Image (cartoon, rainbow, N blue to C red):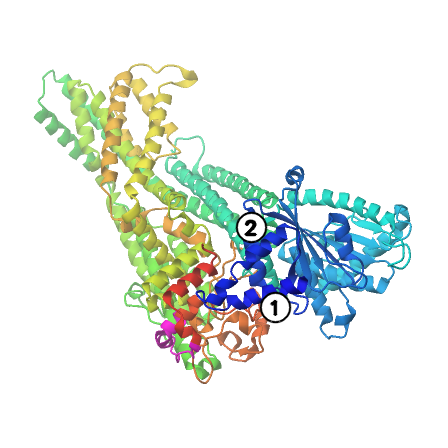
Amino acid sequence: MEHFMREIGQLYEAACSLPDNAESRQQFQHLPSVVADLLLDGFPLELVDGDASNIPVRWVTDVLTELHRKVQPKSRLLVVTVLGVQSTGKSTLLNTMFGVQFAVSSGRCTRGAFMLLIRVKEDLKQELNCDFILLIDTEGLKSPELAQLEDSYEHDNELATLVVGLSDITIVNIAMENSTEMKDILQIVVHAFLRMKIVGKKPKCQFVHQNVGGVSAHNKNMTERKHLLKHLNEMTEIAAKMEKQQSVSKFTDVMEYDAENSNWYIPGLWHGIPPMAPVNTGYSEAVYEFKKSLFEVLKHCKDDQPPAHITEFLEWMESLWKSVKYENFIFSFRNTLVADAYNDLCIAFSKWEWSFRKHMFSWAAEAEVRISNFKSNQPTNLADLLRCLRSEATQELASEEKKISDQLAEYYKKKERHVRLVEKYREDFRNSIKSLTKETDNAIRNTLDKAMAIKKGMTKLKDIHETDTAAIERKVLDVLKDCRERGVDLSDTQLDEEFENMWRETIYELNIKAMDKKDVASNVFKQLRTNLERQGSAVQEQLNNVKDFTKCGVTAFEVHDKNHFQKCSFFKRVLNVFKNTIKQTEEMANNLIGQCKDYVSKQKERKTDYHDIYTRELLVMIDETLEETNNKKLKTNPAFEVELKLHICGFAAKGFQQMHEQFLMENNPEHQLEKFKTQYKSTFVDLYHKKDQRQKKAKEFVNLCLTPAVREYVHRTLGIEIVDAILTGGESVKYSSRSFFQFTILKQLLTEGNVSSYVRYTNSYKYFVKECILDRIICHFTKDASIGDLEIKCLDVITTKIEQAVKTAQTGKDNAALPNDSKGTSIFIENICSILSKDIVIPQDTLGGITFQITAKYEEFVTDLQTFLKEMNKLLRAEFSKGCKIEEKLKNLPFKPQDELFKRVFGCGEQCPFCKVPCEAGGKEHREHHASVHRPQGLGMCSYEGSEKLVETICTTDVYSENKFKNIDIEGKAHPYKDYRRFYPDWNIAPDASIEASDYWKYILTTFNEQFAKEFNAQPADIPKQWKSITKKQALKSLQELFNVK
């Protein structure tokens, strides 16, 4: 029967190689359905071909797929496997335990591996959480037939790894008569268990000792159990050394093992020599006891990891078989289950990370508002406030770090499928949490320092303004008193004349002087010199030779091949490599210059005074980019750094000088007083005529104080709302993980078919991603959504807070009612400002003019205020609904959504040293960089020495081969690809000859071969003939398979 079934499978696989519409193929299409029915009836199906030692993957997959179709959704499996030396009664044990019919007879040996399905009864389904138990019976290890072959050990090891990897429980069958054989089988089995631990799967294990006399005396076998554990520890140590797992030293490091409950002793089946010997009834009794224990273990399997569905079992089987064939167990995201599990973890971590960042940015924005609202008459000073805020920041960070750490721990406790497959990456994500906390801490400290520097800069101006304002207010009251004492009613024209005379005299008496203008350029140059002071005498001499710093940054920056690179003999030998290096360096410099110009523009828009902290921030940006450049080994020298910094600081100094002068002009004390002249005049006239001020003052408070503060609040919080809208809307899947984002970009590039975009994607990945994200945000809010809707959402939040503040402010200390007079109105306004002090910045100078000699009664003022608040809400809603230029809006936001989304999908930013594929590892602080699939190295600007043709092979194949490489990083000396970790220790490129370049990259390299060669100063690659037949449709399908997008 087994031969017949095997040949049916072979015929089916042969037919599947025919075209889809071939008649011969159609004749065999019903076979998987027939065999699926046989499986349901209890017939075994061959999993591993005993003759060819091969899994007929297509045949087994189609049979089990049909089985899944017939029984779905009830297709959950628990897999039980038996392993052991040949002729130790493995098949008999399974037959006795489960009442099945694996083929057995005297002297018969199982070849390959067979699987058999047992339907679980309804009363057990809930306890086991599965619908079927799949039994796998294997051929004996250490068989005499294979012992003569050189690779018999490898064959046994492969078989053990495969079946252990497929199992939930592995029964290791040991014959007690032969201790040497026991030692050999233990080594094979332990090796298999260790490999499964490495990939994250943890099957359980039961040891069955057969042919044991006196099995009832369990305590007498304590010595044997200790002896077995000793052997297991020895074998584990040997296997760990072979697999380079230093952390593993004993068997219990690999899996849970209980010497008492994981060992079973079973007597021989026969009393004497079969077939004439009588059956030993003690055999069945011992097997029955073992079976009861086994089912208890099976019940606990669902707690550790829920049983897989048939489709998941097939995916795991296929990827595991590939790993077995190509000796690639340690790392491979070609395994879709591992890839899915890792991607799910990355998606979850991205959500936690955004929640962390969002909370801390909101806290930092609130802290900035508190600093801006700080009053000099408060009991604490600015230094105390800064200390307090830093302490609060530390507490907030600790709280958020604990929250995200707890979420990670809870994620790994989940019982969902395949979480254990990503156990090895837990520490990477822990490190990423620490890195996130440190990065955020630095950013918040910088934000607080900057806000404090701005506040200190404004304090002197504020003091001058308060002094001048107090003088004006005294004079206004003096003139008012004088006019009233004359006993004659003055007209409005006469009052205006009186006020104007008083104003001119007061301004003259105050003798207001403009603030001194700084030489910003000299301050910037001083900061630059401080930044470069450790660079040595040559750099200091270069700075000393700068005669006129103001002329720096005027003309375009140029990269010079002679002056800007380290001397390297390899450069001279490989001219094309040098040309590409110059090109990359120019692109890096231009991108950095663009970023720095944006930074200067952003600071100018803040309309604050210049502070040296801005130059220091700019230099940090340059240093970080140059460090990244040096990591990519572009071989630039200190002269390049100095010239680039001089260029950037040169144009920055001009921008900062303009910013400083604009600030002085707008904050000129006389100019500031003039801003409030009309307000004081109006108050003067109203006081003289004793007019009711309630409506005017309420309107002024709303229009001059609350409206600009609300606008600023919307501006400040809009960036967060944009990110939230994208991450919760239709675009969310594109940013859910780096893998999905990569898929989106590559699909877009394929659709556009623009070779220059591909070149920028591979050679300037960071800047390409930034531009791509910005374009997507603009596109999204142009076609699918409205920025105005989000602004209105922010408006609703702050107006609700203001309305609540109005209600709360209507009571004084100890909840006492406010007096219904001007004093009550002043207290009411002061209360509102205090309640909202963490949310909005109310301009105090404007507020002073409003509250000056206010006569409005409190209750009437509140009524009018509520009316004007409704008008403000209506006007701002109309303003936001009109729309705006999205590019300008995004550019000016303090929290830039494009930068946040960039952090989310960009990761560490490292690219494969050979093909330039970006690292896909989650978090930032992972121990190793990796990518699921690499691409032809020619796309990473690699070419063959001599012919200068672009390289068409991929990294995973080359690191498996004997091929050699040479590049700038190793000074042009040839080294084997397989030794790549000597030079790139942080990269893990899985050696696998089975992985070919995907059809996507084959199509791209074939289509744009000539253009890539021209861009990279090389010759076109030798394209394999079969690549030329790949279509765009096939390339897209390959991309979907590559990223597991259904």
**Which residue is disc 1 drawn over?**
326
Report if residue 22 lies within the magenta region: no
Image height check: is 45 above or below 989? above
The C terminus: image quadrant: bottom left
Is 725 rendered above or below residue 973? Answer: above
Q: 42 or 505, which lies in front? A: 42
For the residue carrying disc 2, how many other residues have a C-alpha within 10 Å: few (<14), some (14-19), or many (20+)?
some
Q: Which span of residues is magenta-colored?
A: 1004-1025
Please say if 832 is above or below 176: above
Q: Which residue is mark 2?
A: 68
Upstream in the sequence, badge 1 or badge 2? 2
Rendering coords of residue 478 (x, y %)? 20, 24
Kind of residue at disc 1: Tyr
Foreground mark, 1 or 2?
2
Q: Inspect the image, locate mark 2, and give the three-letter code of the amino acid beneath it.
A: His
Q: Is residue 115 left or right of residue 1005?
A: right
1019 lies left or right of 980: left
Q: Position of residue 944 (x, y in %)?
A: 46, 80
| Image-quadrant location for residue 833 | top left
How far across and how far down the image is residue 277, in percent? 90, 56
